[in-house]
Image (cartoon, coloured by chain):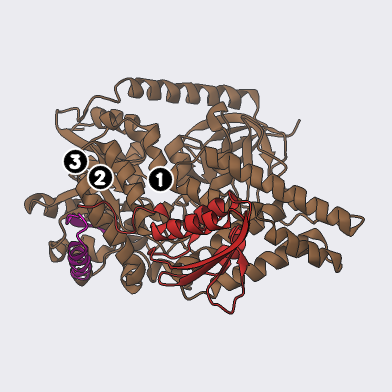
């Protein structure tokens, strides 16, 4: 039996798991050549079939738009064109792996060189198709994650994460990864424990392990005392959770009787299936990056409208704040974002939207049309100067006029801003043209402390409870209150129970949290009172 | 009955013959026993309308004049059905939303 070892990373999704370690096999597994061209062709056909079957399976678990995209990928895979072209290369001496890669790369090239942004964006789908078959060929995807295991991997694709049934326990430990990645958001929304950034720590397959994703710690081969302590911690946390869940439908009121509005963050429309609208006061942040996700390409107006409609219908008249596409920084979108050396200080968020108005206008039209279907508010990410609000308002006005001319029903939403750049937090009065403020504590923290939030080595430097960050939060909240500008906070800080009291202390009375955290944050609010 | 049917249609769908429209187009084409081909110029190349890889490969944007030809059983019906689908903007919600 190996000695106990403690491995630390960053907590990406709180929770506890005990199970055997499952180490993902390395990505660059070598393809083993077959004995004859006939066998190569057969191996390719079989791999395509396996890849298609796994897409079909994932499709069943996803909702509307995402399922449509997978249906497209499936249709592309089942089409014989690629396999026929690959078979030709195989007959002239290539192995299945090279042949498939070469055929798909040529095809991807033709998409990437297209002038049409929509077709260009589809190159990501083709990369996905290409990669999924190559993975099967090299034997990688054949290994599924065993139920209840703690999966250790360099990173994990959202589709792979979604394809696994996490209801039987287990968790995720990533060597790289980021707490702000799409997959980390999915894990938080579903309450799957996840830590990221453990680096090259040695972890062996099959070893018993304890994952305390609250503390960002993985204990491998724990001794009896560690197991007992873990069980205590886990059951105390489970008790806290079940107590909190029992009161999840009650309003959030502080210990001294002040009402707090508690809203939910939606990263993907399917998140709404995991939470009751009766438990929250609305949606404080609906991200739209899922629509633009790397594997799905640029969405058309109807696709966007359908996604917004789904959440507005679910909200049943409660407010839904939809954030315009916040790409760039650590959220690249193929065919849309610009590769930059210093992407966090580059063309991201509203800067990118304004730089690519042809893409932004599609989203604006979908938002204007969706506004009639409920209480929709639009939120702009990464605003850093007041002129950006004016520019966006002008675009909304132009698109509204165009829709009116076409006789398409629409309505002008409230337009507010994320407060995540220090320039806004320091002088909020210059941004009073916004209809509301929502503090993005993750970015605000990294910009105030000059510590990149995707750098695992700086994990302890950039924390939202830093006095400088809290002082700015209080400054913005105070300005909002005196001037009747609704102010909320939708960053991860609101989901961290230790920080909830500090945020309430800074004056905030409107918090937006991850779906799996609603009950726990309500409980933390009830424990807090002004006098401490 | 066997015959060759030829016709043409202008793509009015906002995003052209994009992913979802291509899925619908090729699915419909596959329901007919005849061969169905499309081209974006009389000079060709004529490509198999039942292959999504090839149909997407035309990267036909809005405004493209799409030529269709079918040969074999039910060719007339096939061409009529596919033209109707393109004219309905692939049932993508009329391109510009609910009337109102």
Residue occupied by mark 2:
A320
How many marks on residues? 3
Q: Nearer the viewer, mark 1 or mark 3?
A: 1
> Callout 3: helix, strand or loop?
loop
Q: Which chain does tag 2 point to?
A: A
Residue B32 shown in magenta: no
Asked if one can make out residue A146 in the rendered structure from this viewpoint, the answer is yes
Say which quadrant the N terminus of chain A sits in: top right
Chain letter tied to red: B
Q: Which residues are magenta?
A: A390-418
* Label 2 with label 1: CB-CB less than 8 Å: no
- Measured in 3D between alpha carbons, the distance from the residue under mark 2 to the one under mark 1, in whole angstroms, is 13 Å
Q: Nearer the viewer, mark 3 or mark 2?
A: 2
Question: On the image, which quarter does residue A227 sit in?
Answer: top right
Which residue lies most toward the right here?
A35
Most foreground residue, A121 or A470: A121
Say which quadrant the C terminus of chain A sits in: top left
Residue occupied by mark 1:
A268
Chain letter tied to brown: A
> Callout 2: helix, strand or loop?
strand
For marks 1 and 3, the one nearer the N-term is 1
Residue occupied by mark 3:
A509
Q: Residue A153: image x %, image y %?
A: 63, 47
- Measured in 3D between alpha carbons, the distance from the residue under mark 3 to the one under mark 2, in whole angstroms, is 17 Å
What's the residue at 63%, 68% (across, down)? A107
């Amino acid at each position: 039996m190996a000695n106990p070892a403690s491995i630390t990373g960053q907590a990406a999704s709180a929770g506890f798991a005990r199970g055997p370690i499952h180490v993902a096999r390395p990505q660059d597994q070598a393809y083993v050549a077959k004995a004859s061209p006939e066998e190569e062709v057969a191996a390719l056909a079989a791999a395509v079939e396996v890849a298609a079957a796994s897409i079909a399976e994932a499709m069943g678990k996803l909702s509307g738009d995402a399922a449509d995209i997978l249906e497209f990928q499936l249709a592309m895979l089942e089409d014989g064109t690629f396999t026929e072209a690959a078979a030709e290369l195989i007959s002239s001496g290539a192995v299945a792996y090279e042949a498939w890669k070469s055929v798909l790369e040529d095809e991807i090239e033709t998409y990437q060189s297209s002038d049409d942004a929509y077709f260009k964006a589809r190159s990501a789908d083709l990369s996905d198709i290409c990669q999924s078959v190559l993975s099967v060929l090299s034997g990688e995807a054949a290994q599924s994650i065993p139920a209840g295991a703690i999966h250790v991997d360099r990173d994990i694709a959202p589709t792979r994460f979604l394809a696994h049934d996490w209801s039987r326990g287990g968790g995720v430990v990533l060597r790289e990864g980021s707490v702000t990645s799409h997959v980390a958001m999915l894990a938080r929304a579903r309450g799957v424990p996840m830590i990221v950034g453990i680096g090259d720590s040695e972890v062996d397959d099959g070893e018993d392990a304890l994952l305390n994703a609250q503390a960002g710690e993985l204990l491998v081969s724990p001794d009896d005392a560690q197991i007992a302590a873990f069980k205590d911690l886990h059951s105390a946390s489970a008790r806290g959770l079940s107590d909190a869940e029992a009161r999840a439908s009650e309003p959030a009121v502080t210990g001294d009787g002040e009402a707090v509005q508690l809203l939910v963050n939606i990263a993907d429309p399917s998140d709404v299936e995991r939470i009751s609208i009766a438990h929250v006061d609305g949606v404080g942040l609906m991200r739209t990056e899922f629509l633009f996700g790397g594997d799905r390409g640029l969405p058309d107006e109807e696709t966007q409208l359908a996604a917004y409609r789904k959440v507005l219908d679910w909200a049943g008249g409660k407010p839904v704040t939809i954030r315009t596409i916040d790409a760039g920084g650590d959220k690249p979108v193929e065919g849309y974002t610009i590769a930059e050396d210093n992407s966090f200080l580059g063309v991201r968020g509203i800067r990118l939207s304004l730089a690519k108005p042809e893409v932004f206008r599609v989203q604006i039209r979908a938002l204007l049309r969706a506004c009639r279907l409920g209480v929709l508010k639009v939120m702009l990410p990464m605003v850093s100067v007041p002129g950006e609000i004016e520019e966006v308002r002008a675009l909304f006005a132009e698109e509204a006029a165009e829709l009116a001319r076409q006789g398409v029903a629409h309505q002008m939403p409230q337009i507010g801003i994320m407060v995540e750049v220090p320039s806004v937090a320091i002088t909020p009065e210059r941004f009073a043209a916004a209809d509301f403020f929502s503090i993005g504590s993750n970015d605000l923290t990294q910009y105030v402390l000059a510590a990149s939030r995707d750098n695992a080595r700086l994990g302890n430097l950039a924390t939202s409870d830093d006095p400088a960050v809290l002082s700015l939060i209080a400054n913005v909240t105070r300005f909002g209150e005196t001037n009747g500008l609704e102010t909320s906070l939708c960053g991860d800080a609101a989901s961290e129970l230790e920080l909830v009291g500090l945020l309430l202390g800074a004056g905030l009375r409107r918090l937006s949290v991850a779906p799996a955290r609603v009950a726990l944050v309500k409980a933390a609010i009830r424990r807090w009172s002004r006098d401490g | 009955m066997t015959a060759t049917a030829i016709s043409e249609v202008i793509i009015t769908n906002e995003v052209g013959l994009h992913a979802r429209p291509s899925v619908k187009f090729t699915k419909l084409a596959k329901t007919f026993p005849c061969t169905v081909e499309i081209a974006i110029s009389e000079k060709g190349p004529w490509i198999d309308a039942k292959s999504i890889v090839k149909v997407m490969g035309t990267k036909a944007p809005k405004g493209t004049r799409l030529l269709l030809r079918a040969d074999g059983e039910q060719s007339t019906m096939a061409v009529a059905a596919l033209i109707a689908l393109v004219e309905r903007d692939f049932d993508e919600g009329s391109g510009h939303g609910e009337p109102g």
